[in-house]
Amino acid sequence: MNQLPSGFRDIFLVFILCVLIVFSVSVNKSESQNEIHFLAFNEVFQPSTLISTPTLEKQRSSASTKPKNKEIFIIREFKWKDPAQKQRETVFQIPESALKDEIKKFGRPRSMTHPLMMEKKGFKIIGRRDTIVNRKILEKVFTIVDYKKIFLRNLNYFSRLTHILMKSADAAAGQDPLYVFLSFVQYIRYQRPPEIYKGKFIGSFFVPLVCLNEQYGDCDSKSILLAEFLATAPDSKEKMAMVLVRGGGLAHALLGVKRTPLPGMTALYFQERGYFIVLETTRPGWAPGFIDRRVTDALKAGYFMCIELN
Amino acid sequence: MYPTDNLQLLSTIIYISLIFASVIISVMGSIIIITFLTRKKIQVKEEIVKNKNIGIALVLGSFIWTIGRMCFESIKPIMNVWYSSYASGFSTKSIFSFVLGIFGSLLAALIIGAIAVYLSIKVLTVINKDINEWEEMKLHNVAVGIVISITVIVVGMFFETIVSYIVMNII
């Protein structure tokens, strides 16, 4: 150590000191959580709005998870690469009745614009504004997809599908499946769904079963699909939220999962709920907590809202 | 993959190491670039310490900021690859390629920073053909130093956005 030039020695000592300071200051064991946190991360954003709807009771689906004797299944094959870059193939058997049920429950006829009917068909009203058209006052209603309702409703179908996915990825029951599921969803083809599907207005959003059936989806469709897999993994206690980014020329959706962010990750902080790391589902190559620079800039500017899923 | 104490400790060490490397590269790189641009006519340490030249100090500071920003922009892609490599499992080849990727990324950040700095100085010298900026700064002209610093910083802000995309392709 004494033989090193003094400059290098000083830099090395400062480096060790920084590591020790970060280690000692950020190691804390919470009595309730009993976790060790390392706080050497950057880019944590606090959302201004958090939409937390009351927990809905899980709606019993008309499609049973056990295959009935005369149940028709739609086979869908997916080729993807797991985190170790090994080629995988997953074959899903989607009950046709469940798929038809979901298509029926989501989406409104084009002419149907009454707010109550829109809420019944899977949309949620987030704002109203009066506009004057031809000297008449008309009410304009702003809606988004009711992600939480769709998420909770689809949970029944996904426990079997998640088991198939874990089996095809050779993922053990106790292993953390986050990265495996994220890789699978990222390899699903990215394409914006149509505004009108099967004669109904769906707002360019595929419900999870339809996303698997069609084998493509956009950011919010794939994020909800990933949320379904994560929620139905064995012994899953995953807390998740949809992060909708809109502003700065960007309209995007990410999935937030309640995890301790590691160094370099992008995370959102909720006052009562803690840290949520963001997951990019649109294309392969993004590790959990890493997103495109444009999206990071939009988050920094506050152009986002969060919807709790569970 | 998540969360193990080993992963958190290793990631913290790598992250702090990268920050340190960025600081060292930006400071040393800036001094070397000034020496190169002025063809060794300006000795940076002598000008700042002995002659207390504020103009040179401002220019050095802007160079350090620009190259430092480039290096910081390359840290995120490196950490992205680190977590992906950790999840996929390590082999000798993957560790070797990861370490090589770090050096390549920081080198790319330094080169892009140098290009940004060189470009901004070149633009100024072309626009102000009747002024020799370096000679003016040697004569303690702080105003010229301020103009050069701000030009370098602004050009650096434009180049900053492309660094992460280039580094992701390297790694």
Image (cartoon, coloured by chain):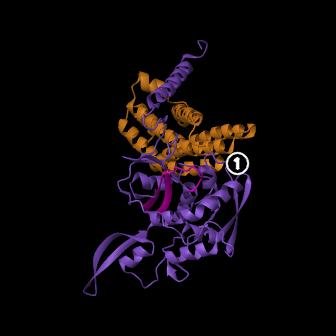
Chain colours: A purple, B orange
Q: Nearer the viewer, residue B122 or A2?
A: A2
What residue occupies the far bottom of the structure in this picture? A134
Residue at the image position 49 percent from the left and 28 percent from the top:
A23
Mark 1 residue element: loop
Whether residue A280 sits left or right of residue A93 in the image: it is left
Whether residue A270 sits left or right of residue A23 in the image: it is left
Residue A283 falls in image quadrant: bottom right
The reply to whether residue B118 is visible in this rendering is yes
Residue at the image position 58 percent from the left and 12 percent from the top:
A2
What residue occupies the far front of the structure in this picture? A69
What residue occupies the far top of the structure in this picture? A2
> Which residue bears the numbered disc 1?
A84
- Dot 1, how many residues are within 10 Å of its Cα: few (below 14), some (14-19), or many (20+)? some
Residue stretch rendered in magenta on the structure: A232-257
Residue at the image position 61 percent from the left and 43 percent from the top:
B1
Give residue A249's position: percent from left, percent from top: 44, 63
Q: Is residue B171 above or below residue A184?
A: above
Instruction: Please give the chain letter of the residue carrying mark 1.
Output: A
Give residue A191's position: percent from left, percent from top: 59, 69
Q: Quadrant of the N terminus of chain A?
A: top right
Majority secondary structure in the magenta region: strand
The reply to whether residue A195 is visible in this rendering is no
Q: Is residue B74 above or below residue A212?
A: above
Q: Which amino acid type is shown beneath numbered disc 1?
A: Ala
Q: Is residue A109 above or below residue B24?
A: below
Is B164 colored magenta in this rendering? no
Q: Nearer the viewer, residue B109 or A105?
A: A105
Give residue B38's position: percent from left, percent from top: 52, 35
Residue A137 falls in image quadrant: bottom left
